[in-house]
Image (tube, rainbow, N blue to C red):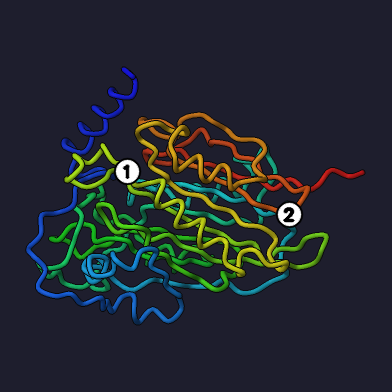
Amino acid sequence: MTVRFLRLFVAIAAVSGCAASTVALERPIAPSLTTSTECLSRDTASQVSWHTAEPTDAVELARWCRAVGVPLFVNATASAPPALDELVTVSWNAHLAEGRLPELIDELRSGQLTNGRPVRHFALLVQELYRRGDGVPAFDDHDRSAFAIVPRDPDAADVEDYAQSLGLSFLYVPSMRNGAELREDRGNAIISTEPLLDTMAIELPLARQRRVALLAGVMVSTPSGVRRLELVNAHLEPLSSPRTLWVFKNPRGRQVRAILDLLEAPRFTSLDVAGVVLGGDFNTVLRGDEEEGYRHARMWSKSLRGEDRRRTHVMGRLDYLFFRLPDGWHGSTTRLDDRFGSDHYPVLGRFDPPARP
């Protein structure tokens, strides 16, 4: 009981004391003058299909959505699909401009992160990247914005720079504006050596801020033939709303259930699917892997065999990878020992094929 209340105190202190942190409160707002659910950055994003988990949130979600720019999508050139056990996945919260994404990719490719074995094929599930510039619309006081997480270097690379320079498939969808006074937004990305297929975004049940999870497929080779591996990247809400003093109601279980409900759709359960990887920053700041959100995902993840349980952040274990794979296949995770400039450690996942008879 003492530990639980200490975590509550730490969470409250972190929120109230750091408007430049990942759990900063949203900016005070003017009352809404409209019940419109329209949002150009979502409604004109033809390359991304959209799903809203709870339609009753639609009006408020649109206020957040209208304050951000359109999704960014660049696809790599198609090549022969890699074997499933040659693909490596990583989940990492980059903390906006602080995270050194090119360095992480370079070390992954060189084998420094995989016991000397170079990695040619990978999929990164990255949270909290940001975009700046005129691609983010001017702010209307009747829309919604989080307080800004301000990078130390104002010239640091953003998603537009990465999409142009990395030479990889790059899908970025913003969840929220990064400060009403800035032309910036922030959100999640899926970055891969492989072409991304059927990209999708899901607006999670609203608690305090708009949270958008990303989904995309990549083709892989398996003993049963070429199949599609589905990737899901989620950044869950660390706090609830002011009505519950931010911490006395945990929204993450509901958000995970919304993702898992979607994963029951035929797209994710057909015989053409080589498996599903669910990863992200689950923000389990109160009870770590004892939280409901983790338990739901872990129960769904029937193929996760080896799990590195070390903390990934000063607040505890927040970052995860979960796997649901064909019979005999297993996934395992390793927390890396370098944060690459972020305040989160990356979590690396591998696929293990069935044992030979």
Residue with the mark numbered 1: 238
Kind of element beneath mark 1: loop
Residue with the mark numbered 2: 326
Kind of element beneath mark 2: loop
Q: Position of residue 69 (x, y in %)?
A: 29, 71
Callout 1 amino acid: Pro
- Left or right of 287, for residue 323: right
Tell me if residue 169 comes above or below residue 303 in the rendering: below
Residue at 55%, 61% in the rendered image: 263
Residue at 28%, 79% in the rendered image: 40
Point out the residue furthest to the top here: 2
Tell me if residue 112 comes above or below residue 86 in the rendering: above
Q: Position of residue 175 (x, y in %)?
A: 32, 61
Comparing 243 with 156, the one in front is 243
Figure quadrant of residue 41: bottom left
Residues tagged 1 and 2 counted as in contact (Cβ below 8 A): no
- Left or right of 12, for residue 87: right
Residue at 43%, 33% in the rendered image: 288
Q: Position of residue 160 (x, y in %)?
A: 37, 67
Callout 2 amino acid: Pro
Q: Position of residue 24 (x, y in %)?
A: 22, 45
Badge 1 or badge 2: first in the primary sequence: 1
